[in-house]
Amino acid sequence: MPYKARQKQGERRKREKPGYRVTNAHAYNQSLKKRGMISLYVPHGDLKAQLINTITRTRGVSGREPTYTAGYIKLIYTF
């Protein structure tokens, strides 16, 4: 393998590795900040009312209602 012989003799590479530089640092930093943002669309208004059950007890029924709705649990598993 010729590249190993060249490596042992201390010669330089035939082609230099490409060097990448950020040319517009401000826009690059802004895009990195945006990458972590997640926006949710809630069609019926109040997000808390749709995801968290505020009524935990139903009169005449034994046991407790689940605190979180199925939609909330699906949302958590998605993330």
Image (cartoon, rainbow, N blue to C red):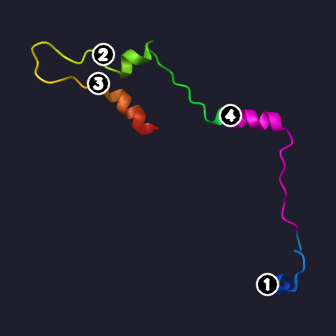
Residue under the image location 81 percent in, 82 percent down: 3
Q: Position of residue 42 (x, y in %)?
A: 47, 19
Q: CA distance from mark 4 to mark 2?
A: 34 Å
Q: Nearer the viewer, mark 2 or mark 1?
A: 2
Instruction: State which tag comes first along the sequence, 3 or 1.
Output: 1
* Magenta-highlighted residues: 16-33
Dot 3: element: loop
Q: Position of residue 51 (x, y in %)?
A: 37, 22
The answer to which quarter of the image holds residue 28 is top right
**Circle number at residue 33:** 4
Q: CA distance from mark 2 to mark 1?
A: 69 Å
Crowd class of label 1 (few under 14; some 14 to 19; many from 20; radius 10 Å)? few
- Three-letter amino acid code of the residue under disc 1: Lys
Q: Are marks 3 and 4 in contact (CB under 8 Å)?
A: no
Q: Are marks 3 and 1 in contact (CB under 8 Å)?
A: no
Q: CA distance from mark 3 to mark 2?
A: 7 Å
- Three-letter amino acid code of the residue under disc 3: Thr
Crowd class of label 3 (few under 14; some 14 to 19; many from 20; radius 10 Å)? some
Dot 1: element: helix
**Circle number at residue 54:** 2
Relative vertical location of residue 35 with respect to residue 42 in this rendering, above or below: below
Crowd class of label 4 (few under 14; some 14 to 19; many from 20; radius 10 Å)? few
Relative vertical location of residue 35 with respect to residue 69 in this rendering, above or below: below
